[in-house]
Amino acid sequence: MRAVVLAVLLAVLPMLAQAVEPDEILADPALEARARVISKQLRCVVCQNQDIDSSNAGVARDLRLLVRERLTAGDSNAEVVDYIHARYGDFVLLKPPFTRRTVVLWLAPLVLIFAAVLTGGLSLSRARRRRTDAALDPEDEARIAAAMDRYKQGGSE
Amino acid sequence: MKRMLAGLPLVLAAILGAFFLWGLDPERDPNDIPSVLISHPVPEFALDPVPGLDVPGLATADLSGNPGPVVVNVFASWCVPCKAEHAVLSRFVERDGVRLLGINYKDKPEDALRWLAELGNPYSAIGSDLDGRAGIEWGISGVPETFIVGGDGTVLYRYVGPIVGEDAVAKFTLALQQAQGGLS
């Protein structure tokens, strides 16, 4: 049992590994915390869908250092992001801004949900209508009632 | 209403088909990162020359007021594709008289010197970007990258990766001709 626990612990150990190297970390914990927040919003330009905070790429490291340098120089979080955005464009933002070019990107999920609810609602209501349509007319009801009566009296056809 | 719904699958198929056609287009490179620099002035940077080399360094001022477009190439001795690209760039310089400027990206000066001594130096100026900061100003994601800068200091074109092979050379030559044609 102990061996299993040890094995599992060893197996998850690499998950603790971080891309941020000790020499990058700022002495001021508040600034460092802000740097981490910003780094998580910036996309690494060579590894596509990874933020620079968790990327080991050289450019990602450079950008992390740049973020910390700007923060130390007194920039606000937004100013730091703008600084890098100005150089690398929308691509570098993990959450792209809402502009005319990204309108499809932002609205497509809403449109799809709307379409799904609409088709779902339509087909459900139609199914319900079909069920009520299937109700028997009085003539049939009378025939069934008669048949049931005969059955209850023990008679047979 | 019914008739409209009957046409819906066809419309959906057309929309999806167009999307797939776009997505599967071999010309489209999803890794292609559009440069924000195109048709903007070159970024502010100033790089010292590589120590021991007889060509000057490179700064923003060197890229404006040129008689024609110039080519800025980001390279490093540790970059293997750069070695292949070197021959292509040298030919541009020797055959077409292109003015080629270099940014030596994150390279040890002694390595850069050895590399240029071995292969020859087609660059008329090389800035040594030791910490890669100028690279960030240019918005590069790796080496090699090559820019065409107009005589007035406007970035006209960016090529990511080595200009090696017929297609790449043809593409770059076309861009260079357009840059030259647009100014004369």
Image (cartoon, rainbow, N blue to C red):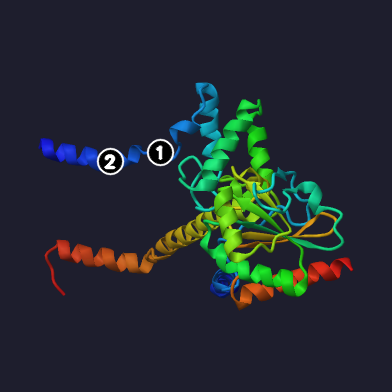
Residue count near mark 2 (Cα–Cα under 10 Å), binned few <14, some 14–19, many ≥20 = few
Type of the residue with mark 1: Gln
Q: Residue at x 18, y 41 (%)?
A: A7
Q: Position of residue B64 (x, y in %)?
A: 83, 53
Q: Position of residue A4 (x, y in %)?
A: 14, 40
Residue A18 is labelled as: 1
Type of the residue with mark 2: Val
For the residues labelled 1 and 2, the Cα–Cα distance comes to 13 Å
Q: Is residue A57 left or right of residue A82?
A: left
Q: Residue at x 63, y 38 (%)?
A: A81
Q: Is residue A104 left or right of residue A52?
A: right
Q: Quadrant of the C terminus of chain A?
A: bottom left
Of the residues under marks 1 and 2, which one precedes in the sequence?
2
Which residue carries the number 2 mark?
A12
- Looking at the picture, tell me which residue is in the foreground, B166 or B8: B166
Which one is in front in this view, the residue at disc 1 or the one at disc 2? 1
**In the rendered image of this protein, does residue B103 appear above or below residue B177?**
above
Residue sitting farthest toward the bottom = B166
Q: Is residue B48 left or right of residue A95?
A: right
Q: Residue at x 50, y 22 (%)?
A: A29
Parent chain of label 2: A
Q: Quarter-wise, where is residue B45 in the image?
A: top right
Q: Position of residue B32 (x, y in %)?
A: 60, 61
- Looking at the picture, tell me which residue is in the foreground, B94 or B140: B94
**In the rendered image of this protein, does residue B85 appear above or below residue A7?**
below
Q: Secondary structure at mark 1?
A: loop
Q: Quarter-wise, where is residue B131 in the image?
A: top right
